[in-house]
Image (cartoon, rainbow, N blue to C red):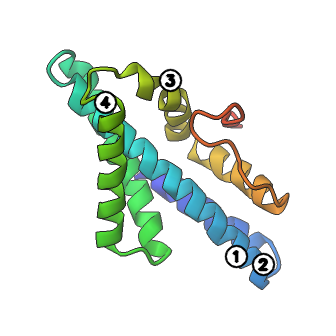
Amino acid sequence: MFRAVLFSSLIVSTALARPASDSSFSDENAVMREVSSELQICSAYDAVMSRCMGQQEPRVSVGYDKSATNLERLARDNKYSLGQSPEAYGVQSEIYRDAMLKATSNCANLAILEQRYATFCQRLEVNVDGRVREWTSCVRGNEKSCGRPGGASSAIASPP
């Protein structure tokens, strides 16, 4: 809940701190869309890891499940505020989870997911605001990508 408030308040305060214009509103929406999508992907990653670790490491599984729930709440609330329907959100989440399960051969090779998502998603979960700032910089700089999960430039700035 606390992270959701921080994330949402950062978006609002960033929008209020600049003069209102169509491009600034568009920039803020672009940042919200990108970060919300990353939160949704990381939620799917944590949900798959929880499911796959359930039998082998129940304590680890519970941790992944809590993370998945927290990230999912942030992603869902922000995507809804951008106009995405609950149905569309649910379908997209299912597609992400199914693709991740398929990539691991139904949990047989979790290293594939861990290599691509673990570090990125852990950093995102503890510092959503840093990711918002990073995306804001990228959008204002007219960059096409701002370090997707698994990419070389996916570092998230440490909190101040």
Q: Position of residue 94 (x, y in %)?
A: 29, 53
Q: Residues within 10 Å of mark 2 (few under 14, many from 20)?
A: few
**Can you name the residue that lies furthest to the left here?**
55
Secondary structure category for the residue under label 3:
helix
**In the picture, residue 26 is in which quadrant?**
bottom right
For disc 3, the marked residue is 115
Secondary structure category for the residue under label 1:
helix
**In the picture, residue 33 is in which quadrant?**
bottom right
For disc 2, the marked residue is 23
Image quadrant where one finds the C terminus: top right
Relative to residue 34, is residue 136 drawn left or right?
right
- Nearest the viewer among 100 and 67 is 100
The answer to which of marks 2 and 4 sits earlier in the sequence is: 2
For disc 1, the marked residue is 26
Secondary structure category for the residue under label 4:
helix
Disc number lying in front (1 or 3): 3
For disc 4, the marked residue is 49
- Look at label 4 and name its amino acid: Met
- Look at label 2 and name its amino acid: Ser
